[in-house]
Amino acid sequence: MKLDKLKEVVAASERGETSYLEMTAGNDSCCRKFVPRERLIVLGGGHISQPVCRIASMLDFAVTIVDDRPLFANYERFPDAEEVICEAFRKAIQELHIRENDYVCVVTRGHQWDGECLSEILSGQMPAYLGMIGSRRRVRSLYDALEKEGYSRRVLESIHSPIGLSIQAVTPAEIGVSICAELIAHRRSSAPKAEEKQVLEQTDVNRQMLDFATHGDTPKAIMTVIGTKGSTPAPSGAMMVIDTLGESRGTIGGGCSEAEVIGLARRIATEGGRAIAYIDMTNEAAAQEGMACGGTMEVLVEAIEE
């Protein structure tokens, strides 16, 4: 594994961009995707926004709350938010500089503010997901008004509105669940399909692991789960870095599954090269150790080299 390739992943994550790391194992190729933590911008700080913020933060979204009322835009109401902005909606949207991988929920207190938010968003970069609360009649009326202002009907129809999955939600908490469920559905459905190369399952950006991998003078090796069958403690794409002294970051499942590979990884960190380790969790010994028996893991181990 070339060090500069890992540094490119770090640089892309700092820019908020998705990046890819291609790997070759024997005659097969696979691709590890690194998706920076998605930003969820919630426009409106009312009662529905509170459960949305709480649940979305649990789903690893970086939540930003925007409202123009100090009583609604504060960290006491939104302790799980990364950022709370008390500002007029138009100005806040301009200052947030919406990116193509952002998620945006329009849940303001009225038709007028919904229109302001949409017209400002549609004038710039479209986010990955845009949803708006409201009845079908209210939404249709707003779309008609925006179309008369020159906005594309096709783009308007791409907005998720009424927002959320249809689960007969009534209470603010239930509506929050339906909205976050739709965010999950969009996140998963927008993942690129593998073509020539297998795209591994895990796509998080573990900055602690990447910083450890790209800094310091101690030789290191990186372990990547490139294949699984049956029940395993980690999905494909799980990664771990270890140096020759035994210090490590990340995980490929913990317990015996890691212990089997760590010795090999430390040797490769010292000597260089690469190897594939096969971990079998189907036998009695694995079951006695409390491992998730019934599956196998294939782990690619590579020295990190200049």
Image: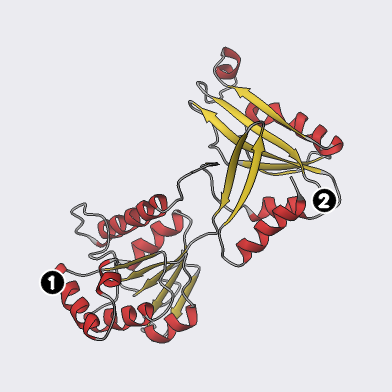
Q: Position of residue 162 (x, y in %)?
A: 22, 65
Residue at image location 22% in from the left, 60% down from the top: 171
The mark found on residue 267 in the picture is: none
- Name which of mark 1 and mark 2 comes first in the sequence: 1
**Left/right of residue 51 with respect to residue 270 in the rendered view:** left
Q: How many marks?
A: 2
- Amino acid type for the residue under numbered disc 2: Glu
Residue placed most toward the observer, 304 or 57? 304
The mark found on residue 306 in the picture is: 2
In this rendering, does residue 294 appear at all? Answer: yes
Q: Position of residue 225 (x, y in %)?
A: 61, 36
Mark 1 secondary-structure assignment: helix
Q: Residues within 10 Å of mark 2 (few under 14, many from 20)?
A: few
Q: Residues within 10 Å of mark 1 (few under 14, many from 20)?
A: few
Residue wearing tag 1? 137
Q: Quadrant of the N terminus?
A: top right
Residue at image location 39% in from the left, 57% down from the top: 55
Residue at image location 52% in from the left, 59% down from the top: 37
The colour scheme of the drawn protein is: secondary structure
The image quadrant of residue 56 is bottom left
**Left/right of residue 76 with respect to residue 131 in the rendered view:** right
